[in-house]
Amino acid sequence: EVLQSIREVNENSSVHGFIVQLPLDSIHRIDTEKVTNAVAPEKDVDGLTSINAGKLARGDLGDCFIPCTPNGCMELIRQTGWRHVLYDIDISRSCVPKCIDRLAREIGLLSNEVELYGKTKAKVHLEAIDRLRIQPDGKYVVVTGITPTPLGEGKSTTTIGLVQALGAHLNNNVFACVRQPSQGPTFGIKGGAAGGGYSQVIPMEEFNLHLTGDIHAITAANNLVAAAIDARIFHEATQSDKALFNRLVPLSGGHRTFSPVQINRLKKLGIEKSDPSTLTEEEITRFARLDIDPESITWQRVLDTNDRFLRKITIGQSPTEKGYTRTAQFDITVASEIMAVLALTSSLEDMKHRLAKMVVATSRNGEPVTTEDLGVCGALTVLMRDAIKPNLMQTLEGNPVFVHAGPFANIAHGNSSILADKIALKLVGPEGFVVTEAGFGADIGMEKFFNIKCRYSGLRPHVVVLVATVRALKMHGGGPSVTAGMPLPKEYTEENLELVEKGFCNLRKQVENTKHFGVPVVVAVNAFKTDTEAELQLICKLAKEAGAFDAVQCTHWADGGAGAVELGKAVQKAAEAPSNFRFLYDTELPVVDKIRIIAQKIYGADEIELLPEAQHKVHLYTKQGFGNLPICMAKTHLSLSHDAEKKGAPTGFVLPVRDIRASVGAGFLYPLVGTMPTIPGLPTRPCFYDIDLEPETGEVIGLF
Ligand SMILES: *[C@@H]1O[C@H](CO)[C@@H](O)[C@H](O)[C@H]1NC(C)=O
Ligand SMILES: *[C@@H]1O[C@H](CO)[C@@H](O)[C@H](O)[C@H]1NC(C)=O
């Protein structure tokens, strides 16, 4: 009877949909499966037929009925925009990733170029670059943002959303190249960095935690250098030159031989000898004694944890170190120069070279002391030999992603590696797109991306995507500050065109900044549920008036690639537009001039002021031959100026440069503007309170 009446309704063209009320009959058992499956799938509004359930499971959402209760829950979550309802990890887990070897095949990698790390991650060998050498590069797109606010603008999410849109929705070959996040913030304040919502890299726990161990390799390599420095000072302090020499070049089988790294040091000293027995007393002294001035050591130990109590420590307190104590500090691992080297290197050979050139201190007579002088550079290359290979993962919508490197943008240049970008550009081919990111505001991330990363890679970007939000512009316009855990003030949740217009000055300045480099810029306005149409349109209109190639709204956080289709189309068009890329400064200019150009043109400063320590370093580094390196400003990202409190687009200020450091191996000088924490601390209630493991399933919970 039931089946018969279902059939009738199926055939009745005036009925468009119906449900079978369950449970059926508790006394006379009826086969529920059979009954629900008798409903014609196109009328099955409950979504209970095997066909609809199957389509839902496969993600063919356009083509099936989604059961109303879960659909209603999802809609509620979307409408309230209340992230805490759904952690990013829950969304990440709702999708079954493609097997990574299948993805690697799909994008044209050969099996001998791929090294699997389980089912969802693989390392890609650098031979791929050689094989694809003659293949023309794809289009290179860089995502950056307005000056960040505590409200979050969603740059990584935009990178992934754009890739999803360009890929599945607009049918291009695409690649995302993103950095690997530090674990410090994952357990601290910020949470992960895999994107968010429906625009993420999956599996996000793999991405945010150990990945393939690259950061651990950097910790190990960095700390080997630190150990080598202090041990060397200790041994030099307790031995004569002769004894030092005899230990450094030990007798074996009746004679002494230099190791290759020692021959390199001799060459650097201008001693063209290879037989240890022929060195004069004076040469022995110069060779054996590095004579490091402990005050001049710029190499710190590192750890990938937000441990503020390591910001200043005393080392060597055990009696075995015979009173050789010194004040030292820890930095976060991603702040290590080795991370910057990894991001900027172009081959294994080049990495080896850069790791050998790193300057760790100055000798008492003013010579730079390098990792090669310490004899440790070969070992560093060995520790880094796997880390140099980019890691392949995927987006929620199955697009390829390289996750590789990720220097601490406060003091380095931020963002993913040159090698990953290069391989990806070859793999997508001339019509395809590679989207990468230069974090923070455009004044920091983008400026360094162009002047440092593009200078070393030789790659030329086609389009800049500049991310903005209504709420962030309101804050730049003078909106109230926010406190974590408190509801947002109404300025951010109700229409306020005046605040948007006032805060637009920050976006205008950042658009101007991209124009210094001659690349077309598309503004992406990440829409939040509480933004009004009038607010969103106002920003787009003002952005186009300010000279943006285009300005569009996007909703990829809630809608995945489908929410960034307009952005994708705008980027496709902009990539065809004429661009004439240029650097902001010539590296041959004096150090002070380079800093001044950045401060005036990009930050809007009137002048710069070099404090005594910075002046001293300008002389020292120029004398040591490092004056022609590009500049990597270490400035707060929270303002265009040096004062994090100054929102909008400040003018009429003098930028104070406190000190200058050199990353000779990575290849830049970094002026310190104000004080910059190099290891973050934990807040009172860190993210780790929410993070746990479900022992029955082994699943991680509570990760953003
Ligand atoms: C089709 O369904 C409508 C609405 O329930 C009903 O009024 C009509 O009698 C049905 N027609 C047939 C042929 O069963
Ligand atoms: C680039 O670096 C900045 C600053 O560390 C960060 O906010 C951003 O997410 C990074 N992006 C990528 C893709 O590496």
Image (tube, rainbow, N blue to C red):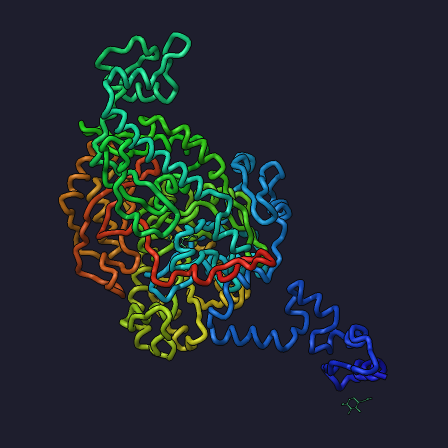
Query: Which residue is most to the front?
Result: 319
Q: Is residue 648 left or right of residue 527?
A: left
Image quarter in which the N terminus is found = bottom right
Across and down, in percent, residue 593 comes to 20, 44
Using the rendered view, name the quadrant where residue 367 is placed. Answer: top left
Q: Is residue 218 left or right of residue 628?
A: right
Query: Which residue is most to the left?
Result: 612
State the residue in front, 532 or 2.
Answer: 2
Across and down, in percent, residue 186 comes to 43, 56
Q: Is residue 345 above or below residue 689?
A: above
Across and down, in percent, residue 148 comes to 34, 61
State the residue in front, 210 or 613.
Answer: 210
Across and down, in percent, residue 287 comes to 27, 19
Q: Is residue 306 left or right of residue 75?
A: left
Using the rendered view, name the quadrant where residue 372 is placed. Answer: top left
Q: Is residue 637 above or below residue 424?
A: below
Q: Residue, x 43% and y 64% (percent of image)?
A: 524
Is residue 457 at least partly visible in the picture?
no
State the residue in front, 465 or 319.
Answer: 319
Q: Is residue 12 above or below residue 660?
A: below
Q: Is residue 94 above or below residue 662?
A: below
Q: Regarding ligand 1, which quadrant of the image does it lie in?
A: bottom right
